[in-house]
């Protein structure tokens, strides 16, 4: 599991080198791509209005995920749910 103090987003390993990231629902990423996705989420969370340099960095990072910086920033903001506070399913008794 990957988490960050900067964002509520997280990445979770689903086996071997396959990861799912909270702001990219429905996609499975490699471990390196998951690190990139978490870096983007942390950068977006800690920056109000990105500078020109930050946009360029975000664009390079997003390219690794097949996105533009603007698409990634939008998706991080749109999918911003605190998954750490999601209620866990109750266990049923088999009796």
Image: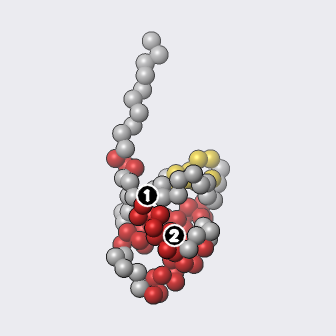
Residue 71 tag number? 2
Separation of residues labelled 2 and 1 (CA atoms): 12 Å
Give the structural element (helix, strand or loop) at label 2: helix
- Look at 51% across and 70% down and name the residue there: 71
Q: Is 80 left or right of 71, judged from the image as shown?
A: left
Give the structural element (helix, strand or loop) at label 1: loop
Residue 25 tag number? none
Pick the residue in front: 52 or 93: 52
Residue 45 x/y as whole percent: 37, 69
* Crowd rating for badge 2 (residues with CA inside 10 Å; few <14, some 14–19, many 20+): few
Residue 24 x/y as whole percent: 53, 58
Asked which colour scheme the image uses, the reply is secondary structure
Residue 58 x/y as whole percent: 51, 77
Residue 52 x/y as whole percent: 45, 87
Sequence-wise, which precedes: disc 2 or disc 1?
2
Q: Quadrant of the C terminus?
A: top left
- In the figure, 87 relative to 29: above or below? above
Q: Is 56 left or right of 93, judged from the image as shown?
A: right
Q: Is residue 10 something that shows in the picture?
A: yes
Pick the residue in front: 20 or 70: 70
User: In the current view of this chain or complex, which residue is farthest to the bottom?
Assistant: 52
The answer to whether the residue labelled 2 contacts the one labelled 1, judged by CB atoms less than 8 Å apart, is no
Residue 79 tag number? 1
- Look at 58% across and 70% down and name the residue there: 67
- In the figure, 60 relative to 86: above or below? below
């Amino acid at each position: 599991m990957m988490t960050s103090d900067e964002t509520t987003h997280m990445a979770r390993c689903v086996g071997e080198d396959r990861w799912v990231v909270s702001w990219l629902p429905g996609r499975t990423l490699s471990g390196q791509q998951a690190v990139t996705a978490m870096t983007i989420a942390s950068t977006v969370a800690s920056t109000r209005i990105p500078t020109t340099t930050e946009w360029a960095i975000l664009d390079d990072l997003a390219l690794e995920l097949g996105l533009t910086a603007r698409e990634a920033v939008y998706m991080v903001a749109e999918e911003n749910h605190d998954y750490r506070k999601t209620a866990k399913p109750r266990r049923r008794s088999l009796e």
